Amino acid sequence: MQVTKTVAETRALVKSWRKEGKTVGLVPTMGYLHEGHASLIRKCREENDIVVVSVFVNPTQFGPNEDLEAYPRDFERDNALCKSLGADLIFHPEPEEMYQDPCAFVSIETLSENLCGKTRPIHFRGVCTVVSKLFHIVAPDKAYFGQKDAQQLAIIRKMVRDLNFDIEIVGCPIIREEDGLAKSSRNTYLNPQERQAALCLSRAVKRGQELIAPGMDSEAVLKEMRAVIEAEPLARIDYVSMVDALTMRDVEKVDRDVLVAMAVYIGKTRLIDNFSYEV
Ligand code: AMP
């Protein structure tokens, strides 16, 4: 397995693989890898000749008061995990390699405005910009994203369609801890009491999945889910919403494929979870 830090080295390597007729898969990550990331890398390993993992804590997707500095990093561990999963290359650039006083950004409108976009107004612009850059640098055949970040996945799919990237986007299911908590690099911020409290998210997901049925009022489902979270004193709801699976706009009834998504603060840590429902 190789590690590159520059765009030029990465391009040269990918070019040499392409010359040999190999297919290339990309797994974009911010590092501090866990089983959720590993599931994407495994799927990528199954479906491509070459597996590229990017490890880059992308500054443009963090707001001014967010956790860019505090975001956990452990490249040695990430390196070992990627190697054990059979990755061929980790692209691990410094921020200065990726951004030199940038003026070009990629924004996907409408889909970025609701849910996490309300509290994190520049977040998806940063995500779409860095993912576009990675797509140009690595030029993969396929790229792998987790359903854990369901709004991000919907936005990336739309970006690929709207901007004609010749890349297949593969969505992968949410990987959870044994007790239900969705795996996340940010779970490391939680103290033991908060870790216990964080279970209210997956409990609310479960409650929503039990209740939801075609034709129901969305509020009937959301009200019950909110009650599960509100019963937890350490939790504070950012949003619990039901949206059209494609447009990310709020829906009043379960009359199409929907995404039921939430963001909840546990202490200072903002966690997300969701489920999809097809009518
Ligand atoms: P991140 O490093 O948090 O930016 O995540 C990189 C990729 O891994 C994204 O496509 C995430 O959706 C995906 N991912 C993160 N956590 C999970 C999880 N628990 N299950 C599945 N995919 C995940």
Image (spheres, helix red, strand yellow):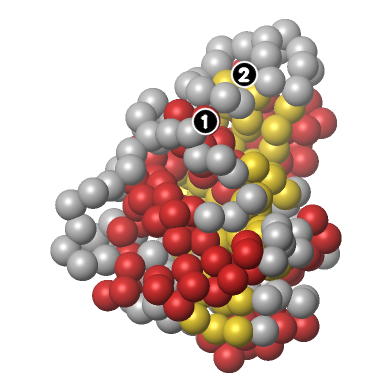
Residue at image location 16% in from the left, 63% down from the top:
101
Name the residue nearer the viewer: 224 or 51: 51
Which mark is nearer the camera, 1 or 2? 1
**Label 2: which secondary element:** helix
Viewer-side residue, 257 vs 128: 128
Give the residue at the far front of this rendering. 19
The residue lying at 76 percent from left, 64 percent from top is 49
Picture layout, residue 83 above or below residue 53: below
The residue tagged 2 is 218
From the viewer's perspective, is residue 240 above or below residue 102?
A: above
In the image, is 237 to the left or to the right of 121?
right
Q: Amino acid at mark 2?
A: Ser
Residue 217, which numbered label?
Answer: none
* Crowding near the residue tagged with mark 2, few <14, some 14–19, many ≥20 C-alpha atoms within 10 Å: many
Residue 83 falls in which quadrant of the image? bottom right
Residue 73 lies, with reference to residue 157, above or below; the image says below
Q: Quadrant of the C terminus?
A: top right
Q: CA distance from mark 1 to mark 2?
A: 29 Å
Q: Nearer the viewer, residue 82 or 198?
A: 82
Residue 152 placement (x, y as % from top left): 52, 44
Q: Quadrant of the N terminus?
A: bottom right
Marks 1 and 2, the one that precedes in the sequence: 1
Tell me the number on the disc at residue 161.
1
Disc 1 residue type (three-letter): Arg
Residue shown at the point (63%, 64%) measured from the top left: 19
